[in-house]
Image: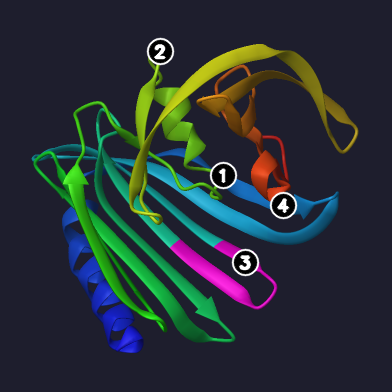
């Protein structure tokens, strides 16, 4: 059942690609993060964020391949021009076999999410108010949307893989120098909190491009391999 669902999702994305290609595509951000735990490299995240402009409007598509050991994950998130989540898919492969598939889409202000794994199937639907952004709890590049569309005060953020919504607050926290090889880069540090809990720390360059994302609860660091060009 899991394998059939995986094939169906890939087919659906393939059918959508020609429509997306009809519009003007602009690369907004792309690169690679090294994933570190206690300063030891355990994997990588290759990502791209593209803006697609077509006759039907503007969307942004964030895609990534995340690899840690024998586990590989593919993630695709599509949002509208204001960052509101439209579609999502997340597939986990272990030893070359599909272990879990999560999909989601918005229907008006209702988010419908479904997870299919070796343990069974689960689904949830709930209201997703306008202004909600999206970001998984352990995917680095999706933090870009929170920075790009940030507002004062609490923001609603959908965790599409967990199929849940939370309130977060993004606040600046000074500047630092990050070293890439032999080059120091001035970075702005940001802190993302859910209540009193720090869920992510983020460092960006002067143009808002991601340099580092830390997930304290997971003891996980995502550090950009190269200085963004």
Mark number for residue 34? 4
Q: CA distance from mark 3 to mark 4?
A: 10 Å
Q: Which of the pair 130/15 is nearer the observer?
A: 130
Q: Which residue corresponds to mark 1?
A: 140
Against 55, residue 67 (above or below) is: below
Against 161, residue 216 (above or below) is: above
Q: Which residue corresponds to mark 2?
A: 153
Residue pictured at 66% horizontal, 44% vertical: 217
Query: Disc 2 or 1, which lies upstream in sequence?
Result: 1
User: Is residue 109 a member of the stretch shown in magenta?
Assistant: no
Question: Is 137 on the left or on the right of 59, as rendered?
Answer: right
Q: Which residue corresponds to mark 3?
A: 67
Residue 89, x across and y down, in percent: 34, 61
Q: CA distance from mark 4 to mark 2?
A: 31 Å
Q: Is residue 71 visible?
A: yes
Question: Is 6 on the left or on the right of 126, as rendered?
Answer: right
Residue range corresponding to the magenta coloring: 66-74
């Amino acid at each position: 059942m899991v394998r059939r669902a995986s094939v169906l999702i890939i087919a659906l994305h393939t059918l959508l690609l020609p429509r997306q290609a009809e519009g003007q595509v602009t690369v907004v951000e792309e690169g690679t993060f090294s994933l570190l735990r206690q300063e030891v490299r355990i994997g990588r995240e290759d990502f791209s964020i593209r803006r697609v402009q077509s006759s039907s409007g503007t969307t942004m598509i964030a895609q990534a391949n995340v690899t840690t050991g024998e586990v590989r994950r593919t993630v695709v998130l599509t949002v509208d021009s204001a960052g509101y989540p439209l579609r999502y898919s997340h597939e986990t492969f272990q030893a070359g076999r599909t272990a879990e598939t999560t999909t989601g889409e918005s229907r008006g202000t209702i988010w419908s999410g479904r997870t299919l794994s070796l343990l069974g199937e689960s689904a949830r639907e709930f209201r997703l108010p306008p202004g909600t952004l999206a970001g998984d709890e352990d995917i680095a590049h999706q933090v870009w949307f929170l920075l790009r569309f940030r507002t004062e005060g609490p923001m609603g953020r959908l965790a599409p893989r967990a199929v849940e919504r939370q309130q977060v607050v993004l606040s600046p926290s000074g500047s630092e120098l990050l070293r890439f090889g032999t080059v120091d880069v001035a970075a702005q540090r940001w802190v993302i909190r859910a209540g009193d809990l720090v869920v992510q720390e983020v460092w960006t360059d002067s143009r808002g491009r991601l340099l580092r994302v830390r997930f304290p609860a997971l003891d996980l660091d995502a550090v950009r391999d190269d200085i963004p060009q």
